[in-house]
Image (spheres, rainbow, N blue to C red):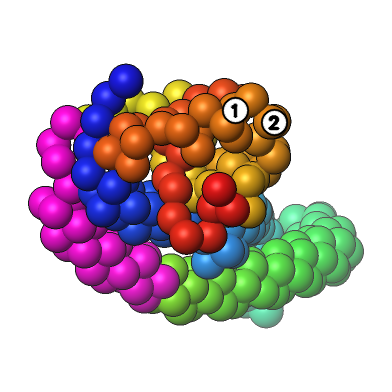
Amino acid sequence: MPKAPAIDQQRLLDLQSLDTRLAQLAHRRATLPEQAELDAVLAERRTVGDRLVAARTLVGDAERDVARAEAAVQQVRDRADRNTKRLESGQGSAKDLQGLQHELESLARRQSVLEDEELEVMERLEQVQAAAAELAGQDAELEARAVEVTSRRDAALEEISGEERAVVARREAVAMTVEDALVALYEKVRAPRGGVGAALLRARRCEGCRLELNASDLAATRAAASDEVVFCEECGRILVRTDESGL
Ligand SMILES: [Zn+2]
């Protein structure tokens, strides 16, 4: 049976509570609500970003359609202007002039159709521009939220790290007061036992597994010298005896 001074065994409980605190801090870091919030904001921003890219593509398409429609209207207007000038000059045969007159009428109808089309594409451009602007606004809002949540997340992480540094320093100080062999034994026992290697025996109950010692284990524990390291028969943890143990 391993041996260690009773006081060293009792200091294992301090070591254990500091290790438990470190495990809690690691768990807190891994499950930070600010991180979950940030992940959600970033995911939403990716979705909005994809929609924004699609909306800007539609704006580009609509701008080209408007330019094409404007050019088509302009072409008809220019042609009509030329015809009007030629008519006003009165040059050419009566047949030519009549032909020009007919073409002018048909150009006017064509211009009216093209202007309607131009209006339509301009309206569509306004709609897609408005949609893109709305998405750009959402994107900017999400970006600002991401910055804000990141700063809260970083503050929470910094708080955890600060406490961790303090606990690690205290742990080192406590570990220095315990025999190396006992610390090594504690580490070996706790690794496969959910991080708990030493448990107080309180009122005949192991605080590691919460089970009460049976009569024979109790008798053996009672009989063990104070510098003998005893283990819980149920969970295998180092059982630390104090005045509270009920022996
Ligand atoms: Zn136990």
Question: Left of 224 or right of it: where is 69?
Answer: right
Classify mark 2: residues with Cα within 10 Å, few (<14), some (14-19) or many (20+): few
- Reading the image, the residue beneath label 2 is 214
Using the image as rendered, state which of residue 135 and residue 197 is in the foreground: 197
Q: Which amino acid does label 1 sit on?
A: Asp
Where is residue 7? Give x, y as percent. Answer: 26, 53
Using the image as rendered, state which of residue 245 and residue 36 is in the foreground: 245
- Magenta residues, as a range? 155-182
Confirm if mark 1 falls within 8 A of ligand 1. no
Tell me, for residue 30, which label it has, or none: none
Where is residue 124? Give x, y as percent. Answer: 76, 65
Tell me, for residue 217, which label it has, or none: 1
Using the image as rendered, state which of residue 50 and residue 74 is in the foreground: 50
Q: Which amino acid does label 2 sit on?
A: Asn
The reply to whether the C-beta atoms of the residues labelled 1 and 2 are less than 8 Å apart is yes
x 50%, y 38%: residue: 222
Q: Main secondary structure of the magenta part?
A: helix
What is the distance, in whole Å, between disc 1 and disc 2 at their CAs?
Answer: 5 Å
Q: Quadrant of the N terminus?
A: top left
x 63%, y 46%: residue: 204
Classify mark 1: residues with Cα within 10 Å, few (<14), some (14-19) or many (20+): some
Q: In this rendering, is residue 182 above or below 16?
A: above
x 34%, y 52%: residue: 10
x 44%, y 48%: residue: 241
Residue 184 in view (yes/no): yes
Residue 167 painted magenta: yes
- For label 1, the SS is helix
In the current view of this chain or complex, which residue is farthest to the top?
1
